[in-house]
Image (tube, helix red, strand yellow):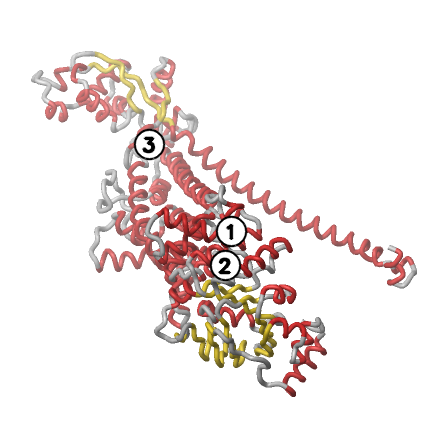
Amino acid sequence: MKVRERISEASFNREYSHTVGEITSPNSRIVCRNVNVYYGEKHAIQDVGLDIGRNEVIALIGPSGCGKSTFIRCLNRMNDTIPGCRVTGQIVLDGQDIYDGSLDVVPLRAQVGMVFQKPNPFPKSIFENVAYGPRIHGLVSSKAELEEVVETSLRRAGLWDEVKDYLHQPGTSLSGGQQQRLCIARAIAVNPEVILMDEPCSALDPIATAKIEQLIDELRSHYTIAIVTHSMQQAARVSQRTAYFHLGRLIEVGETAQIFTNPRHQLTEDYITGRFG
Amino acid sequence: MNEICEISGGSSSDRTIDVVHASLVKRRQAEKRFRLYGLLSIVAGLCFLVLLFGSIIARGYTAFQQTSIALDVYFDPQLIDPDGRRDPSALMEADYDRLLKNALSSMFLDVKERQAKRALYSLLSAGASYDLRDLVLANPELIGKTQKVWISADDDTDMLVKGQLGRTGAEGERRIKDNQIAWIDKLEADGRIKKSFNTAFFTSGDSREPELAGIWGAVMGSLFTLLVTLSLSLPIGMAAAIYLEEFAPRNRWTDLIEVNINNLAAVPSIVFGLLGLAVFINFFGLPRSSPLVGGLVLTLMTLPVIIIAGRSALKAVPPSVREAALGVGASPMQMVFHHVLPLAVPGMMTGAIIGMARALGESAPLLMIGMVAFIVDVPQSIMEPSTVLPVQIYLWADSPERAFVERTSAAIMVLLVFLIFMNGLAVYIRKRFERRW
């Protein structure tokens, strides 16, 4: 294993220094250029350039520790909470550089929602979980309107029928898959434009995973979605574009079908054929 | 199993399972030994606890009863109300001592000598005449009548009746003389001596006379002091913990502050007393011996404890909750107050209550600011001089009277009840409000 890694590393250095494939998208929503992330001394992401398009699902794949989660967390500045983390380069959302010093992260995060690896509902009722976002952002003016938003969000997350009679039970009493869909409902309740998903199905069983994948497909018509995943089948099923990360660099990006059937980079091929990773 | 044999070489003595069995005996023994050590230490701890509680209770339970003597008091109008006007101010000033003495003398007609009479009168509490006065003031109808009244006994009488003073030995070395013993025995035989619940112990302030001394003054002093401590240290401590843990930038200054808070938690409490004396009393001129100054000193002492407990409670809140809140666009303050704090509050409150319990049991710093003074009045506000329970215990433990021994133990019991109550409250709060995530 170790030896094989070293060979890949060597081939990487010898043959390639740039990303293979088209990093731009025909209908770009988020434009990232020269993104570097440092955790203290560690250079976690090196010179990544990538566009994410409107109504598109982009899958980020790669071996553990390759920086795909770090990259996705840059897109709504969740990395700000990690001490010693430094981000350079440009990430532009709708013509606004989100790392501009004058930008307020609170509206940014309302605009760019996030679903985490481990389902993390608030230890409050199901209703409160979904209602929290709209309430703090003042998106609703009456209780009836709030109830409507909660219902719509739960419906979109495909959870309404399962929980409509238990809205005042704690969110943590749900099963893992339901919790994750609750987290998705919570994220879409503030009506974001982009949804980031950091391995949303890694803790779920195949049935719950299938539900969430179906949900992602439905959400695509309203939102821009970036999803980090360790499952290549999942990436192939839900995404239109796929980006392959390796050791902090973006190796290859392209149409999902092309990446999985005809990868142009040796490392991508090695990874998707299961030779390492 | 066969496969394992083959892997390990075939010969049966080499089987892995045999090696495991051989080492198992040793492991089991080690485990047994360890459990035994644990059990022994628990048993030793329990023994000491039982010894401590046993000795305190055995010594102190008698203090909850007080001996009183029944006297047929003739409320002689000539003595207490010569004008016959029932004037309360005149009644206040009247000589009730004489009534008691007359009542006693009429029961022991053979006591004639001056010295013997004095010994006879000393069977009664020095404060008994005040009880009689209060009786008359409350019910002036009594004047002119004879009534059986229970009068509280002197502490030496009390000790003798409770069997805590020796009846034998050289008379000169005894607190209570032969003739007094004879009188008490006669009273007892007449059914004129009874032991009743010692309400004075719970309702009055300190006194030089053990039978009049109570803990109410110290309880009120403790209450006022804790009130000041709680109302200052809880908000300041929680605010400091929240700021340092959630909002403060991580730099040299906050590191320095953290180190200093940890150091302050380990500073001997008497140093805080000296600090309070220098700052609050000498510099700010606040009243000496007052619960206000005591509370301020104990605030200084408990703050580091509350801050440290609060910070660790905040630290224990899982990062996933913070991420969830930030992820939907909560501001840092909303994240803290809506999500982190509700989860951390039980832990913070537990720390605060344990800090308070420590403050309640603290005496050294309060000695420095004059709360060790002999104060008879029950304090009515945080500005009045007062003492606190642990200092009261210290004062009584220092008193020479035999009856203060049991009262010291009784006061310790009261203090322990308070401490157990507070710690129980901390456990209850933790169990009741602990939320799972």
Q: CA distance from mark 3 to mark 1?
A: 49 Å
Q: Is residue B42 above or below residue A245?
A: above
Q: Amino acid at mark 1?
A: Trp
Out of B175 and B303, give the one closest to the viewer.
B303
In the image as oriented, which residue stretches furthest toward the bottom? A14
Q: Amino acid at mark 3?
A: Phe
Q: Earlier in the sequence, mark 3 or mark 1?
A: 3
> Which residue is disc 3 drawn over?
B201
Out of B306 and B263, give the one closest to the viewer.
B306
Quarter of the picture containing the N terminus of chain B is bottom right
> Which residue is disc 1 drawn over?
B437
Residue at the (60%, 60%) spot, across then down: A202
Q: Which mark is residue B320?
A: 2
Residue at the (44%, 48%) spot, across then down: A127
Q: CA distance from mark 3 to mark 2?
A: 55 Å
Out of A253 and B423, give the one closest to the viewer.
A253
Local SS, label 2: helix
Q: Amino acid at mark 2?
A: Ser
**Left/right of residue B187 with respect to residue B312 in the rendered view:** left
Q: Is residue B181 above or below residue A17?
A: above
